[in-house]
Amino acid sequence: MKKKISTKLLKSIIETDFLLFAGPENMKLKSLKSFNSSNLGKDTVYTLEIFELVKTLKQFIRFLQFVSKYDSKCLHVCSSSKQTLAFLSKYIQENSLKDLITVQNSFTKVKSSAAKLETLLLLEEPLKAHRNVFKKLFEESILIVNKINSKVESNNFGTYKIFNNMLDFKKLIFLVVLIDKILLKKD
C-alpha cells in the first residue's frame, strides 16, 4: 500500500520565498555547500539547499509540537528589529497567543514566567553576542533554543538553527502562521 506524500510544506516554502536569500555578495556564503547564487544588480540571490531547509524546518515543527503538548508553556521570541517586534506583538494580541508567546527586543531581558516549559526563539540574533549566555539560560530554566538568522556561525552552541533572513515580512508571516497553527492545534 503506497503512502501519499504531502507536499504542503514544500509548496509553502516555495510560495513564501523561504527558499531564497538575497543579500550582498559574501565570500563566506560561497564557501557553504548549500548555496547556489545568481547576481541580480547589487544583491546576490542565493538559493538554499532544499533538503537542508526542509530538514531544519521539520526540526522546528517537531520542536513546536513538543512544546504544544505542555499545558504550561512559554515561547520567548527575541529580535532586535523594531518592525519584527511590532508585527509579532500585534499578531500575538489579535490571535490569542499572548499567554503562550512573549516578545522581547533582547535576550538579556527575558524574565521567567510561571510556565513549566520555557523555550527561546532568536530571530536575526546570534547566541554568542550575549555575555554569560549559558548562565542566563539556566537561571531562566530555558533549555531549548532555536535560532533563525542569516549569520554564518562556526559554532551553534547546541541550538537548533534555520539559516534564513527573518527581516523579510513574507518569511516572517510564514513563520508566525506556522507557529500559530501548531501551538493552537487542538488534539
Image (tube, grey):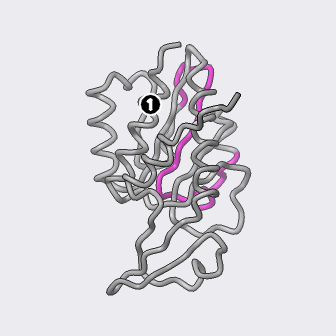
Above or below, 2 against 17 in this view is above
- Up the image or down, 73 lies above or below 41; here it is above
Residue 71: in magenta span: no
Q: Exactly how many numbered labels are in the figure?
A: 1
Q: Position of residue 120 (x, y in %)?
A: 56, 40
Quarter of the image where the N terminus is located: top right
Circle 1 residues within 10 Å: few <14, some 14–19, many ≥20: many
Residue 68 falls in which quadrant of the image? top right
Identify which residue is drawn at 62% across, 69% down: 34
Q: Position of residue 89 (x, y in %)?
A: 31, 37
Describe residue 177's horizontal placement relative to residue 138 as left or right: left
Q: Per the image, is 127 magenta?
A: yes
Q: Amino acid at mark 1?
A: Ile
Judge whether 161 appears above or below 114 on screen.
below
Q: Quadrant of residue 141?
A: top right
Residue in the foreground of this view, choosing between 77 and 91 = 91
Q: Percent x, y for residue 184?
A: 44, 21
- The residue at 70%/68% (across/down) is 154
Residue 36 vs residue 176: left or right?
right
Q: Which residue shows up at 44% across the image and 56% down it?
A: 18
Element on which disc 1 rests? strand
Q: What residue lies at 51% left-to-right and 42% top-to-bottom?
A: 7
Q: Nearer the viewer, residue 87 or 172?
A: 172
| Residue wearing tag 1 | 101
Residue 161 higher or lower than 71, as above or below: below
Q: Which residues are magenta?
A: 112-134
Judge from the rendering whether residue 111 lies leftward or rightward of residue 116; answer left or right. Answer: left
